[in-house]
Amino acid sequence: MNFSGTLLQHDPPRIGLTGGIGCGKTTVARLFAERGVAVFDADQVARDLLEPDQPALKLLVERYGPSLLQQGQLDRPALKRLIFSQPEERIWLDGVMHPLVYQRLEVLMQHHSATPYHLLVIPLLIESGYRNFVDRLWVVDCPETVQRQRVALRDGLDDGLIDQIIASQCPRAERLLQADAVIDNGSASRTVLERQVARLHDEVLAVLRS
């Protein structure tokens, strides 16, 4: 691992944590948070930006109509079905949301400087074209069969929608090719996962001390 030279653009350093749906990014991020690292979740930021008092929700209602709301709240399952059945709508939504999400992340990080580094959990980091937003890219990985099982169990999605979501994301091989480090979460063993997290965390701290 090398944070020297042009690779270190930010202080504290920023590490992007990405991976396909169901690979376990949230679990991995929690393990880093337990080690005192400030963690920022792009999905949570996006959810916050689509609350009733936020301009982003108004843009969605203008485009899709009030049927996208339930008692004033965004009908998130309906939005998910819409954007993954119509790729052009997903592209439009990404164009609206990505700049807003990265702007909000920038603001949030300004209030968390007392941390060895920032860990940004960004599922679409590669797809969004914001690779330079972070100094290093870590990928949480697991076999696609495991992905599918986890998503079906966690979200109750049918196979067709799972296929559409996976197809909309960066191919696994490309994600691994771009990774500065890979966290293998294909095993059911939490101990194995904790060891990988601990090793990466210790490596970063050693580099920052040197």
Image (cartoon, rainbow, N blue to C red):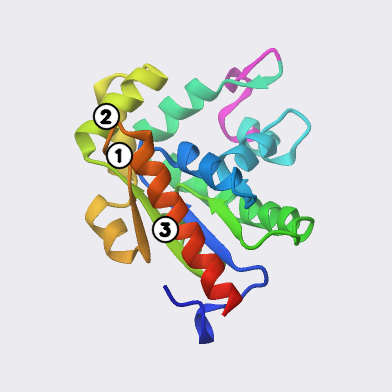
Which portion, as a residue range, is magenta?
62-71
Residue at 61% across, 38% down: 44
Q: Main secondary structure of the magenta part?
A: helix
Between 13 and 21, the residue placed more toward the observer is 13
Residue 21 in sight: no
Considering depth in this image, is 123 or 207 the residue closer to the camera?
207
Instruction: Write the residue at 22% across / 40% down.
Output: 143
Mark 2 or 1 closer to N-term? 2
Q: Which residue is mark 3?
A: 138
Query: Badge 1 local density, few (<14 within 10 Å), some, or many (20+)?
Result: some
Q: Which numbered marker is on residue 93?
A: none
Residue underneath mark 2: 148
Name the amino acid, label 1: Ile
Residue 46 shown left or right of residue 199 in the figure: right
Quadrant location of the N terminus in the rendered image: bottom left
**Whole-percent x and y of residue 185?**
32, 41
Q: Secondary structure at mark 1?
A: helix
For the residues labelled 2 and 1, say whether their Cβ atoms are less than 8 Å apart: yes
In the figure, 113 relative to 47: above or below? below
